[in-house]
Amino acid sequence: MDAIPPQEITLWRRLCDAYVSVREQLDRDLVALADLSLSEFDVLRILNEAGGSLRMSELAEQAHASRSGLTRRVDRLERRDLVRRERVDDDRRGLRAVLTQAGERLCEELTPKYIDSLKSSALVRLNQQEISSIVGMLERIRGPLG
């Protein structure tokens, strides 16, 4: 087996470190603002962007969550009346997550604060040329992986 060059290992570690540190900051900010984790906010944001509802399987895929992990998130959001589950009409076993009015309001309220937090934790350190370069590089990495 060929060894991975040290520079590539360093790149991988820096990507992971950057991702984790930004996620942790966003999570802390959202918990302080609304007692809502970043993972829970992601569910609200995804549902909001999808028009208010998605099948649980589609939501799990878009949220990069296992079905059981998503179920726990939706359970917590449901207890706060931010999301509800509904049966899918054409599939007796299928469930759909639906954003409630309270969930939509909270998502709308938190989105500008989420964006501010994202900017202050990461993007403020980069100029537009750097952002474009990184996006291009990440798209090349992701390309063959789908």
Image (spheres, rainbow, N blue to C red):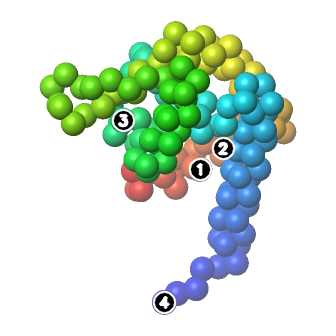
Tell me the residue at 42%/16% (across/down).
51
Foreground residue among 57 and 93: 93
Cβ atoms under marks 3 and 4 closer than 8 Å? no
Task: Using the rendered image of the protein, determine whether residue 126 is visible from the camera's viewpoint.
Answer: no
Local secondary structure at mark 2: helix
Q: Quadrant of residue 94?
A: top left
Label 1 belongs to which residue?
137
In contact (CB < 8 Å): disc 2 and disc 1: yes
Q: Residue 120: where, in percent of width, then height?
A: 83, 32
* Residue at the (57%, 49%) spot, across then down: 138
Marks 1 and 4, how far apart at CA: 26 Å
Q: Which residue is mark 3?
A: 56
- Helix, strand, or loop for circle 3? helix
Left/right of residue 38 with respect to residue 139 in the rendered view: right
Q: CA–CA distance between discs 3 and 4?
A: 40 Å
Pointer 2 residue: 133
Whole-percent x, y for residue 28 in the image? 78, 38
Number of disc labels: 4
Point out the frontmost of discs 2 and 3.
3
Of callouts 1 and 3, which one flags the residue occurring earlier in the amino acid sequence? Answer: 3
Q: Gap in Å between the C-alphas at discs 4 and 2?
A: 31 Å
Which residue is the site of mark 4? 1
Amino acid type at mark 4: Met
Of mark 2 and mark 3, the one earlier in the sequence is 3
Q: Earlier in the sequence, mark 3 or mark 4?
A: 4
Query: Given the image, on which type of amino acid does mark 2 rest?
Result: Ser
The type of residue carrying mark 3 is Met
> For the residue marked with disc 1, what is the amino acid?
Met
**CA–CA distance in space, label 2 to label 3:** 35 Å
Pointer 2 and pointer 3: residues touching (CB < 8 Å)? no
